[in-house]
Image (cartoon, helix red, strand yellow):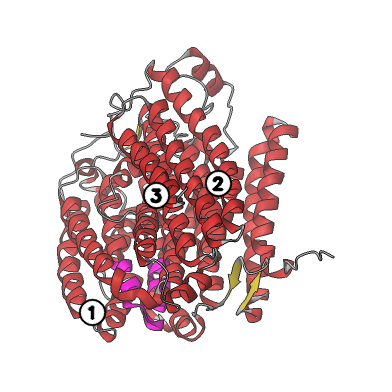
């Protein structure tokens, strides 16, 4: 007699709420009149994210259990990563709510009369909200998945909507479509690597679950070539998603081409989700073969940090600069992965928060600086922004300083805790490289700050648009979090260190 | 027949796909090569399922097929949009972002 599997719906509810709201959003697209659609979609999305957040907080004490027949682990670290993703996604949604950034009709050829008439008719591509919700659901599932099938499905659920959303920019549409093509082809390429790695890990251990793979390592006798092929290919897929060198080539192009609100959302949330999954896979699945993968991942961390910092110096485009800066930060988080300790895990989670909010804030500011043809992304034209609009320039500088790791910003605490955890684990070389790279990176962050405040104003057409109320709220949240966690890191850090653990 | 041969075939298919993604110009062909890689992984899953004597790998291959179908939907939508605005599906023409 077959019995129905016990799914534990209360623990899965946060993800189910988001997925349900996404499906509701699809129905809204089909049945509600154009005039109401946009506001309704914003409402549904924001309420769903808040509801999921509340449900997560309600179940936080039921942790260290598994749900959905062991496919999903609900543990301290998993709950925290999901909370972080939801908080970041909430801010991201506030930007996305400014539908002025998205194309009126994605299917119209750029420059055609069809496009002009859809703009004149005031059409909006409000499908972006359900797509965002689907992506959020994938991001929430990815770091808590404990078997290879769930991991792969979650990876695709988070990626596929992002491919589409990067192609929806209202201005510079050819660039945006090109970004979508590049992101899609390279993303699909890397997920094929992920899957091939998964197949070999299954071949090695005879089990699809991370615990099964860890057990397989203990019982020697299995073919360890399979294990090595599996680890390498799976890592390629993950490192691609987090944008680590040498798998970073999509990052600057996609960040530049995608609509800026989407870039902010993707930069903050995807990184948290992909690193969350990576931490779980390496901490739970590959813990006992650490001597096989640690040297490789350490080398990649160093290359990623150094390359990102150096390449960012020569960039002329704000969005590309932020892209290379995000590559550098991926390197810093990789240091925390290699630390392979409880403190390393807590440091990585804190880094998601500090990096995520600073990134969202910085991209939010980019949406505000415009001329008649849209956003100004040429850094030289930002020169002298501080005189024109001190408030916006100060906020942008704050995010730059947080990226650079100046004390009293959240970025400093993030970097400090990562380096401390790495030092405690004995990876002193990595700490040295990390500190040196921080200095190089700080140079170009400070260069931008100096140029904004003390540079000659060169562009007369530059205007700083008055942000909508939602964008204002979003940027304010980012500013507050960046300062608050810089001054009182213990607000979150202590509980991270206590509760952030993986279920084995 | 030796079961290892299936793994060699799977590795060969995966390599052909990976090389194809790197050297081919047409976005559709690149995408087909990605699909070939996914199917190579499927073959590996099914082979290992036989080798390990459980059905997990066969179930995994079903999931892969469904995901691959979703990928086709999204991928073709993006490629067709690009083709309509440029009259070309060559990945070399899409180079506005490289400056």
* Residue A351 is a magenta residue: yes
Q: Percent x, y for residue A388?
A: 28, 47
Q: Percent x, y for residue A403?
A: 29, 63
SS category of the residue bearing label 1: loop
Q: Which residue is drawn at 41% across and 61% down?
A: A356
Image quadrant where one finds the N terminus of chain A: bottom right
* Residue A248 is a magenta residue: no
Q: Residue at x 57, y 31 (%)?
A: A124
Labels 2, 1: front one:
2
Question: Which residue is label 1 attached to?
Answer: A427
Q: Does B12 sit above or below residue A492? A: above
Identify the residue at the far right of this view.
A1
Q: Percent x, y for residue A231?
A: 37, 62
Q: Quadrant of residue A337?
A: bottom left
Asked whether, in this view, residue A274 is left or right of residue A1, the answer is left
Q: Give the range drawn in magenta.
A: A332-354
Q: How many marks?
A: 3
Q: How far apart are marks 2 and 3 (CA)?
A: 13 Å
Q: Residue A193 carries which label?
A: 3
Dot 2: within a 10 Å radius of its alpha carbon, few (fewer than 14), some, or many (20 or more) residues? many
Disc 3 vs disc 1: Cβ atoms closer than 8 Å? no
Q: Which residue is drawn at 35% across and 52% down?
A: A240
| Residue A94 can be seen in this image | no
Dominant secondary structure of the magenta stretch?
A: helix
Question: Which residue is label 2 attached to?
Answer: B64
Q: Percent x, y for residue B45?
A: 51, 52
Q: In which quarter of the image is residue A350?
A: bottom left
Asked whether, in this view, residue A381 is left or right of residue B46, the answer is left
SS category of the residue bearing label 2: helix
Viewer-side residue, B38 vs A386:
B38
Q: Distance between the residues labelled 2 and 1?
A: 38 Å
The chain ID associated with circle 2 is B
């Amino acid at each position: 007699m077959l019995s129905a599997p016990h799914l534990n719906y209360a623990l899965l509810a946060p993800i189910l709420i988001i997925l349900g709201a996404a499906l509701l959003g699809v129905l809204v697209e089909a049945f509600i009149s154009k005039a109401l659609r946009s506001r309704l979609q914003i409402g549904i999305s924001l309420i769903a994210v808040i509801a999921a957040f509340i449900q997560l907080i309600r179940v936080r004490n039921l942790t260290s259990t598994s749900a959905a027949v062991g496919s999903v682990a609900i543990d301290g670290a998993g709950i925290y990563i999901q909370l972080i993703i939801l908080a970041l996604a909430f801010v991201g949604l506030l930007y996305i709510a400014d539908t002025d950034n998205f194309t009126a009709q994605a299917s119209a050829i750029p420059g055609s009369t069809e496009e002009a008439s859809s703009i004149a008719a005031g059409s909006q591509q409000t499908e972006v909200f359900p797509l965002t919700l689907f992506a959020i659901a994938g991001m929430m599932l990815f770091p808590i998945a404990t078997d290879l099938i769930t991991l792969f499905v979650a990876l695709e659920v988070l990626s596929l909507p992002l491919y589409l959303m990067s192609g929806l920019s209202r201005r510079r549409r050819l660039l945006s479509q090109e970004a979508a093509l590049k992101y899609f082809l390279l993303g699909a390429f890397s997920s094929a690597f992920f899957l091939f790695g998964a197949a070999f890990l299954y071949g090695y251990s005879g089990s699809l679950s991370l615990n099964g793979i860890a057990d397989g390592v203990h019982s020697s006798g299995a073919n360890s070539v399979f294990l090595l092929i599996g680890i390498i290919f799976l890592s390629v897929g993950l490192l691609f998603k987090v944008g680590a060198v040498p798998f970073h080539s999509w990052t600057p192009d996609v960040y530049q081409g995608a609509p800026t609100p989407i870039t902010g959302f993707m930069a903050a949330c995807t990184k948290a989700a992909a690193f969350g999954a990576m931490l779980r896979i390496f901490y739970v699945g590959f813990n006992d073969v650490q001597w096989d993968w640690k040297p490789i991942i350490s080398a990649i961390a160093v290359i990623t940090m150094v390359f990102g910092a150096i390449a960012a110096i020569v960039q002329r485009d704000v969005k590309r600069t932020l892209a290379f800066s995000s590559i550098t930060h991926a390197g810093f988080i990789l240091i925390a992965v290699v630390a392979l300790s409880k403190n390393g895990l807590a440091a990585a989670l804190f880094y998601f928060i500090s990096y995520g909010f600073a990134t969202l804030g910085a991209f939010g500011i980019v949406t505000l600086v415009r001329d008649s043809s849209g956003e100004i992304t040429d850094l030289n034209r930002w020169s002298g922004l501080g005189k024109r609009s001190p408030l916006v320039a100060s906020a942008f500088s704050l995010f730059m300083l947080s990226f650079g790791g100046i004390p009293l910003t959240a970025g400093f605490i993030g970097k400090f805790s990562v380096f401390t955890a790495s030092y405690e684990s004995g990876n002193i070389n990595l700490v040295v490289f990390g500190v040196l790279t921080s200095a190089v990176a700080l140079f170009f962050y400070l260069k931008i700050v100096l140029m904004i405040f003390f540079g000659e104003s060169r562009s007369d057409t530059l205007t700083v648009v008055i942000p909508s109320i939602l964008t204002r709220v979003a940027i304010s949240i980012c500013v507050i979090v960046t300062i608050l966690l810089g001054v009182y890191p213990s607000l979150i850090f202590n509980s991270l260190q206590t509760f952030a653990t993986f279920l084995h | 027949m030796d079961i290892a041969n299936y793994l060699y075939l799977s590795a060969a298919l995966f390599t052909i796909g990976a090389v194809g993604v790197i050297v081919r110009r047409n976005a559709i062909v690149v995408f087909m090569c990605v699909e070939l890689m996914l199917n190579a992984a499927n073959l590996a899953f099914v082979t290992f399922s036989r080798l390990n004597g459980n059905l997990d790998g066969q179930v995994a291959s079903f999931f892969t097929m469904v995901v691959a179908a979703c990928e086709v939907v999204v991928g073709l939508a993006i490629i067709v949009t690009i083709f309509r605005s440029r009259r070309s599906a060559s990945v070399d023409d899409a180079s506005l972002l490289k400056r």
